[in-house]
Amino acid sequence: MKVNFAEGLIHFRQAIFAPQAASHAPDEMLFNNLSALVLDFDLASALGIFNPLPEETPRESHDASRIRTIRSRLACLGYLSHDSRLPIIDPFLIHAIKKFQHDAGLTEDGWVGRQTWHALQELVSFESPCHVNHWFTGNCAGPALARSIALRLHVLGLTDTLTFDDAANLTAGLQQFQSVAAFLHLAEKDIRPEVCPATIDLLFDQDLLVEALATVMTSLPKDVGHPLFSFAASVAKVELWLAGYDVTPNGFQGKEFFQPAPGKRRGKQRLRIPLGRQSLLLSDDSRLFAALTSYWQDHGKEEESPGLAQRFADEFPAFFRMIASAILSQKSLPEAEKSALLYQMVAKQPEQLEAIWQTALSLGGQMWDGMGSRVFGWLHNLQRQPGGKTVGIGRNISRLVYHQAMTAYDIARQALQAFPTQIDNIFQRELQGSDPRHIMMRHDRDLDFQVFINTDGDQEKITQFIDTVAQTSRSFNATCRIIGTFMSTLSLFISQGRTGWAGLILTLLQLADRISSLGRQLPAVPNFPATPESNVLPRT
Amino acid sequence: MPEERRGLRAALERLRDEACDLTSLEVQTYTGNLEVLFDKDKDVDLSSFEAVLKKVKVSGTLKLAAMTKVNFDGDTFLLTSENDLPPHVQRAHAAAVQAGMETREALLSIFANVIGLGGQ
């Protein structure tokens, strides 16, 4: 889809530039501006500038990247027999979504709204925190989690094949994980090689796994067949994929490493083979080798990069130290700073926005990976390194910009949608939930409040009511602030001549941090449901 | 007019008709035993706040426990009937004050921004 960034914001521009008659009350101006903004937001979505998750069952979708991502996620979990990469909603896809929703204890409506999207992210993405306990009932994992465990074991190089109904394969994978965890001292005690919350919690904690690989203190195992090596290579693939490098997180293929004859020269460089064990080298025709070489080059190791990539089995702690440092940078970087970093980068060259958008929209499944703790850290670290590359607008920057603006767009849209209902609730004289047996609250036209508390009332019910009142007013406050600051910043950009979609995107980028922080106060996405009792598989 | 804009129009009309004086906030918190009253008078409509209020005021079973007035300039006055108000009463009173402040602030902020007075 070709997006013209010079056209857009028609309605909002007309609303703010329309001559405001003296008789126009502020509420009339507010109505005109809000209506115009709603229309332009809808237009941005219809034209594919932004692709929010659908609010209701979509008849069709222009969002090829999301559909491809959903397909890929479902295929990874075995709900689709293969990933056709077709960006269309067909009966096979709908059937697969329903099956996943059934297994995940979600409403089986056959379309991916917020809940289903978040559930898929949690089970497949390596960055969304997985609330493992939600998916367990006691020590029994729900069927969707069981599939996710099989996938994770395979992608982390702990099983040779990806199967979803092979208990022996699952047990073997968990035993491999036990060996790796023991070597890396992942837990105080040895973990149990079985599907239980403690073990699975560790398996899904990608940041912890990276940290453990970065801080290997003891010498590496002498046995070249130790699962640590395939595990490290597979985790490296995941991390490189998340950082936007051209590699697929497909587990350990068995061909990546080879054992050279002792003393063999490769090019000009004599290979450093640690004493006491045969060395493992990464084959230079593997995609992992190419991605690692690029990674080291990007981090100022131009000359040494092929050697570092090839000696990965010995050098992996250094690689993971870089990754761990990027994660740490991201975590320690205040949200406002991240937002400013990106805004400044784009504001300097707004003419690049169209290219950024086209790149981001062409990324497909990779658009939604690597957005958590990786890419910002990567960007921040690269900017700090004197020997590092100059950061250009490439794939990573494009997806960061798109993701940041998209997140802010989604929150602003939620605020616009919530506003009428919230006004309605706020101006109900008697606050919802008032009950004379416990507590009643009302207000008059001037929003002056009267509270009545029954001395015999149930204190727990009174507390619940108070919490609801506090949440409602906080939410309303956040909605008004989001809409208010958004309209004011957008007006400013438009008055400076940014009347196309670029104005909207720059506004979103500039306010991304503030909008995201206020967005946490908006009415919450319904909680993820606990796995129903009937929907649980026994542990292996 | 599409549904969404109709909802918006209705909400803003309500806002215009309802909100009058937002320059100060007053919160009054009463405590009392309402159950006694309900036992005696089965005709009280429990879903109507006004009806309950009318009845309890007549019966004199409620007492003013706390009152707060916050002026637009930030001056705040707090009046309590006793030194040790039960914690849940304090919390309820504070929640109502907070709700009143946040709602006022929200409305003023959205109008200020739309007429170009909002700060960045």
Image (cartoon, coloured by chain):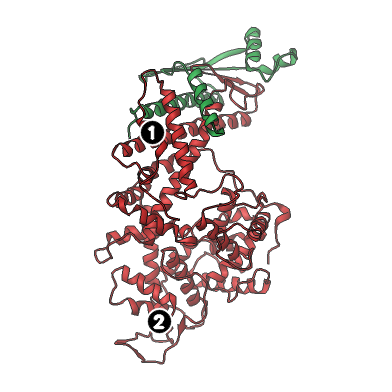
The type of residue carrying mark 1 is Gln
Q: Chain B, which colour?
A: green
> Can you say whether A181 is above or below A198 in the image?
below
Residue visible at 38% across and 61% down?
A395
Residue A222 appears at what percent x and percent y? Answer: 46, 83
Mark number displayed over residue A284: 2
Dot 1 surroundings within 10 Å: few (below 14), some, or many (20 or more)?
few
Residue A109 appears at what percent x and percent y? Answer: 66, 50
Disc 1 target residue: A14
Task: Say left or right for A379 vs B97.
Answer: left
Select label 1 or label 2 by which is in front: 1
Q: Nearer the viewer, residue A468 or A349?
A: A349
Q: Quadrant of the C terminus of chain A?
A: bottom right
Q: Nearer the viewer, residue A246 or A275?
A: A246
Residue A511 appears at what percent x and percent y? Answer: 37, 42
The type of residue carrying mark 2 is Asp
Q: Are marks 1 and 2 in contact (CB under 8 Å)?
A: no
The residue tagged with tag 1: helix, strand or loop? Answer: helix
Q: Earlier in the sequence, mark 1 or mark 2?
A: 1
Q: Nearer the viewer, residue A377 or A356?
A: A356
Q: Chain A, which colour?
A: red
Residue A140 visible in the shown view:
no
Dot 2 surroundings within 10 Å: few (below 14), some, or many (20 or more)?
some
The residue tagged with tag 2: helix, strand or loop? Answer: loop
Residue visible at 42% across and 85% down?
A279
**In this rendering, do the residues under marks 1 and 2 share a single chain?**
yes
